[in-house]
Amino acid sequence: MKEKFIGAGVLAVSLLLLSGCSSSSMPSYHKAAAQFESSSQKTTSTPKDTTKASSDAASESKTATTLKDFSVPKKAKTDKNYVKSGQLTKAHQYTYDQAGTKVSLTEIKPTTKTFINGQVSFKFTQIRILKNQPSTKKALKMANQALNTDQIKGTYYTLQLKYTVTNHRSQTVNIDGITAVKTDQGQTLTQATQMYDAGAGLQLTSGAHKNAFTMALITTNPTKIKHVNVVLGGIFTPSGKTLTKASATKTLTIQN
């Protein structure tokens, strides 16, 4: 169990590298592209990726300095669809992350499904499909690192699921987040490959809730996806004792 949480931490560091931000700030890929803010009154806002591997500290600092060299194209600055900062709220809007990837919002759909696993609820509220166009070799490298793959060679699409997780138990728990996403196009993604989940390793006190998101690499036609199946990860005590195993698959329908 502890090893799985460490693995999630490594992915979090990779996501920080993708954005070129330090661990003390919200990753730009999360802040500018995902924009999944928290409405929680009991916990802090959307979970920040604060896990930091000390052995990566020096390389992360060097990478952040290198990424500052990327400049947004001049023509984008006068484009009405360009969003310098803040949310991407409409289809065709886009922004640039600090690695040099153009991130465009292709689709944004509401969903209102709530699933429960081991007295912990997962309320899904939004589904997004993003088109990502890396313009530098560094951006390609970091995209592959963040999504734990080597398949990204150019433009790629990501599916993002926004959810709020709430602990209804009388004790503090750790969760595995969303451990797998299966599309109706036959693609299966897991935390081990082609997927990043911000909920993996979260700790929730009794009654607490936090916002999180899942980001998965889509290699099929993203506009044809009508529903996705998700697997809710196991629930554990802070010491690692299993309280509830991973759930069966749950279906999310992408509303038209």
Image: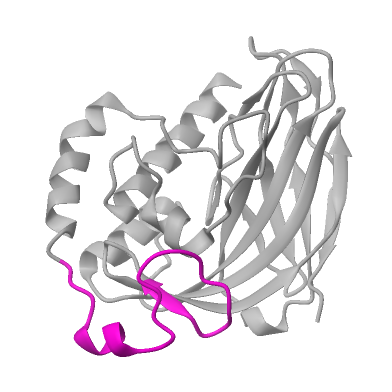
Number of numbered discs overlaid on the protein picture: 0
**Outermost residue to the front:** 41
Residue at position x 79%, y 47% from top?
A: 123
Q: Is residue 157 visible?
A: yes
Mainly helix, strand or loop, the magenta region? Answer: loop
Q: Residue furthest top?
A: 239
Display colour scheme: one colour
Side (left or right) of 26 relative to 59: right
Q: Quadrant of the N terminus?
A: top right
Residue for point 41% across, 58% down: 29
In the image, residue 163 above or below residue 156: above
Q: Is residue 29 left or right of residue 178?
A: left
Query: Along the horizontal axis of the image, is 252 left or right of 10?
Result: right
Q: Is residue 99 left or right of residue 92?
A: left
Quadrant for the C terminus, please: bottom right
**Residue 220, image x, y percentages:** 61, 78
In the displayed structure, would residue 150 be above or below residue 241?
Answer: below
Residue 83 percent across, percent down from the top left: 40, 74
Decide whether residue 77 is among the magenta residues: yes
- Comparing 30 with 58, the one in front is 30
Residue drawn at x 52%, y 60% is 34
Magenta range is 70-95
Residue placed at 76% from the left, 53% from the top?
124
Which is nearer the eye, 65 or 14?
65
Q: Relative to 183, is 58 above or below?
A: above
- Residue 6: x and y, percent? 47, 27
Looking at this view, is 161 or 41 the one in front?
A: 41
